[in-house]
Image: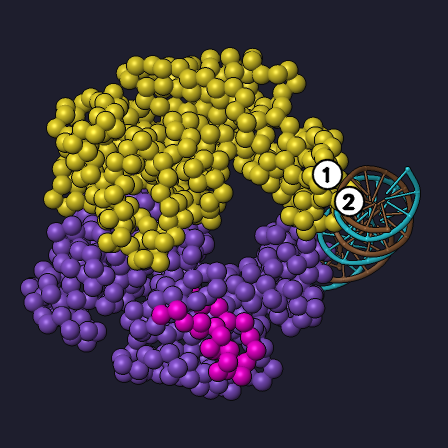
Chain colours: A yellow, B purple, C brown, D cyan
Amino acid sequence: MRQANLHTILRSLHLGGAASRSRIVADTGLTRSAVGVLVAELVDRGYVTEVRSDSGGKRGRPSPSVEPRSKNVVLAVEVLVDSVAVAAVGLGGPVLRSVRRDRSRDQTEIGQTVRDIASLVASVVASLDSGSKIWSMGVAVPGLVRRSDAMVILAPNLRWENIDLVELLRDEMSLEIPVFVGNEADLAALAESRRGAAAGIDDVVYLSGEVGVGGGFISSAQIVDGVSGFAGEIGHLPVNIEGVPCNCGAVGCFETEVGEEALLRRAGRATDGGRVAVAELLSAAASGDESVLEAFAEHGRWLGFGIAGLVNALNPSAIVFGGFLGPALPFVLENLQKQLAMRVLSVVQDDVSLFASNLGPDAPLLGASELAWNHALEAMVLES
Amino acid sequence: MRQANLHTILRSLHLGGAASRSRIVADTGLTRSAVGVLVAELVDRGYVTEVRSDSGGKRGRPSPSVEPRSKNVVLAVEVLVDSVAVAAVGLGGPVLRSVRRDRSRDQTEIGQTVRDIASLVASVVASLDSGSKIWSMGVAVPGLVRRSDAMVILAPNLRWENIDLVELLRDEMSLEIPVFVGNEADLAALAESRRGAAAGIDDVVYLSGEVGVGGGFISSAQIVDGVSGFAGEIGHLPVNIEGVPCNCGAVGCFETEVGEEALLRRAGRATDGGRVAVAELLSAAASGDESVLEAFAEHGRWLGFGIAGLVNALNPSAIVFGGFLGPALPFVLENLQKQLAMRVLSVVQDDVSLFASNLGPDAPLLGASELAWNHALEAMVLES
DNA sequence: ATTATTTGTCATGTTGCATTACAAATAATC
DNA sequence: GATTATTTGTAATGCAACATGACAAATAAT
């Protein structure tokens, strides 16, 4: 019971930021004296500090503000095809350190990746304030991560298969902290729902467009992960039975219609230009290039076609667009909304707002930190 | 804390059936003495009975079996276009009484429906054992039910719009019990996941084929309901951009490809034959009619096309087919699985099993009882 | 018949929050 | 500037509920 209450308080401070003690009383339903004891315990353990705050014009004895101490830290790791990033995130969400190392696309081999991560981690850890306590680590991976054992079953772009990333990282690092692994898009969805474009919204669909198309769903503030943790793989949602062959073997998958290559194809460009070519299209669109705008418009139509299904199925409150779809949102919006209006029941459509990602490329990284915090908060409560 | 523990025990008895006291100790992690006190309280309140059971060959003092008492009852109501059903369901899930009143399809007017329900409820209640206690009522409706206020926003087949069913029922009935309303397919999914074809499975996709196509998702044993409770509306999942116009205004919706009319159309029959015509097709298929089997096969292809998306998105452990799709499953299975094999990542596909509904037309009714039980269990714990 | 094992029961201990009264700190009032 | 109303922290005491540990009861194995 003590633990449950400590957890409630810590979690609300982590997600909602500093709060006055009187507010904690109101939020938790506990009595002043109970909250007094509990907060004293949190102060004692070094998790929070109490600072006197001004009365804010209200009369009565001012209630001190309880603030999360960011010397409590988790590490977050993001593995991409062409870069690896590591960050240290404090209790309450502040990004204390963040480093990213670019690499060429053919250096995704697992051994090298693990060594890269370990060296970035070492440098981040060395730069932390002394006295910092690192509680756990979260890793975002662009692939299928099995929930039961955190194995990376398949990460096509990295050419990984059945990788026990947790064990490899623990062997390579000198840190003795628990490591958790999640799917990139699921974690990005979590980050956007907690701290990003959909902050505070509990039912979110996140879409990220890169070479492939990834997705993550948040329902009632929880990641929808399915039996094994593979939910959200919307890249191969069938949308066009007459479509282009996908390298998954099927035809007309969502990602062959709304991925990078589809956009380049529609604009009449070479489809192997990657991120750079897409960036060119975005600036062409921004400067009003008619034919490029038309390509985006057609892109929006297919995007809306697929998203309409997700909205019908999940009745989300927000859809967040990551990857190149974030910056592309203004150019696809009109047709996208036209499709939604046509295919989604109006009451369901009224619920949903569309946002470009707020966190950009760091969304999965921040999501990994939130994954780590989920477990760190429990560990903090259980300690001593 | 007491309440939480009582709730845990009651809930596990309701869902898992009778359990020995020693088993409750193991399941809950509480001590023998604590469980002793808690079970005594439940006995005292009349919720359970303890009966001595034989040792089962194991040595040691035999542990008495704790059994839910089915004089604790909830009422379940199912509103369909052509019938209304009411059941009384005891703690632990037994269906104590069940009545269904058929009506013609043009008698769905709300006032008449409410009177029909009230009269069926009265007869069911009158037939219950004296001393029974009715805790709550659940209603399954084929339409959009807003979670926040239980309003039926839209039920096209009933021609209902913005109906406050809870208030109307309370006014018409002489019972003073809380009433809860849910979407038919969501509740059917819940029932199948708790007591039906997918009993004990926590990640379920349920599909019901009638005139329209409804769906319900269970994720981590919880109904996925979205912000407003409208999730699961897969009838208008876009699947065929070149398809048939749907009466929702769009083209190529899932239900225009896999609903009753689509099947009849494929078999070259009149599309207004309804349930009877579909039953004829099913028996024709069972007796090997080639052209009908071909229609089912084509049906299976589109079914698989849509389901592939759901499987990719939700990584379920089971898919349950209700309505006419249950009996039709054997005839569509081959092509359905072909589509899944083609469009779903193999690891995700390995997780999923396909089942015909176990509960048949009663699935929504039983789901409504489970909805009622969700709240009844809480009320029972809070009492006194 | 005896022993080992499992489990229920009861007396006592401990944990943790609620209750209550009071003190402290602020704004409003005069 | 003193007084009052209001809000909140603090500390002593009480209570609810589960844990602990010793013992008795009921069964199978020896």
Instruction: Please identify the quarter of the rendering in which residue A135 is found.
Output: top right
Residue that appears at 52% across and 31% down: A372
Q: What segment is highlighted magenta in the picture?
A: B161-182
On the image, numbered disc 2 is attached to which residue?
A60
Q: Is residue B169 magenta?
A: yes
Q: Position of residue A67 (x, y in %)?
A: 66, 32
Q: CA distance from mark 1 to mark 2?
A: 8 Å
Check the residue under mark 1 and report the chain it is in: A
- A358, above or below A279, in the image: below
Check the residue under mark 2 and report the chain it is in: A
Task: Say yes or no: labels 1 and 2 on the same chain.
Answer: yes
Q: Is residue A23 left or right of residue B304?
A: right
Q: Position of residue A311 (x, y in %)?
A: 32, 50
Nearer the observer, B124 or B241: B241
Residue that appears at 28% across and 33% down: A328
Q: Position of residue A261 (x, y in %)?
A: 19, 29
Q: Which mark is residue A55?
A: 1
Q: Are marks 1 and 2 in contact (CB under 8 Å)?
A: yes
Instruction: Please identify the quarter of the rendering in which residue B9 is found.
Output: bottom right
Give the amino acid type for the residue marked by disc 1 in the picture: Ser
Give the amino acid type for the residue marked by disc 2 in the picture: Gly
